[in-house]
Image (cartoon, rainbow, N blue to C red):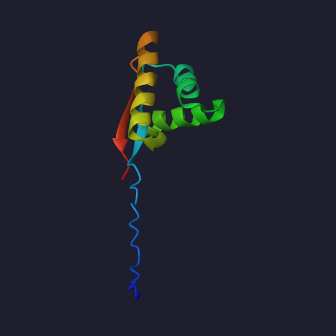
């Protein structure tokens, strides 16, 4: 009754999940939308404080563009669309765009 038992090492394969690519939501400056409205949109859509929203708005005003938030693509596109829709309802040409983060 001789049993031949050979032990084989178990190989485990770890699937490494790739991090999703991040996207920037950018606020584009325009000369028609009031500063107070831009700050209100930043507070409502992006959950910024009054002070942070004001700083982001001023950065866009001075530089032409300002990064509002960096997140996954679907969230970035949803937030940008929500903000643009809010501005359109109020009759302002406020623009938010998304682009991949480098």
Residue in the image at 44% along x and 17% along y: 87
Q: Is residue 31 above or below residue 56?
A: above
* Residue 30 locus on image (x, y percent): 40, 25
Residue in the image at 54% along x and 28% along y: 42
Q: Looking at the rendering, in which quadrant would you find the N terminus?
A: bottom left
Q: Nearer the viewer, residue 35 or 90?
A: 90
Residue lying furthest front in this view?
Answer: 1
Q: Nearer the viewer, residue 9 or 84?
A: 9
* Residue 73 locus on image (x, y percent): 38, 39
Q: Is residue 78 visible?
A: yes
Residue lying furthest bottom in this view?
Answer: 2
Q: Is residue 91 visible?
A: no
Residue in the image at 41% along x and 82% along y: 7
* Residue 6 locus on image (x, y percent): 38, 84
Q: Nearer the viewer, residue 21 or 52?
A: 21
Relative horizontal placement of residue 35, taking residue 22 as reference (left or right): right
Number of residue marks:
0
Relative horizontal placement of residue 43, taking residue 74 as reference (left or right): right
What is the quadrant of residue 39 in the picture?
top right
Residue in the image at 40% along x and 56% along y: 17
* Residue 83 locus on image (x, y percent): 46, 24
């Amino acid at each position: 009754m001789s049993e031949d038992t050979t032990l084989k090492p178990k190989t485990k394969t770890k699937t490494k999940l790739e991090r999703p690519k991040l996207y920037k939501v950018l606020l584009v400056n325009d000369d028609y939308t009031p500063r107070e409205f831009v700050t209100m949109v930043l507070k409502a859509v992006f959950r910024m404080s009054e002070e942070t929203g004001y700083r982001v708005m001023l950065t866009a005003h001075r530089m032409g563009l300002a990064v509002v938030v960096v997140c996954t693509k679907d969230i970035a596109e949803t937030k940008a669309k929500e903000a643009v829709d809010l501005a359109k309802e109020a009759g302002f040409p406020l623009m938010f765009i998304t682009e991949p983060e480098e």
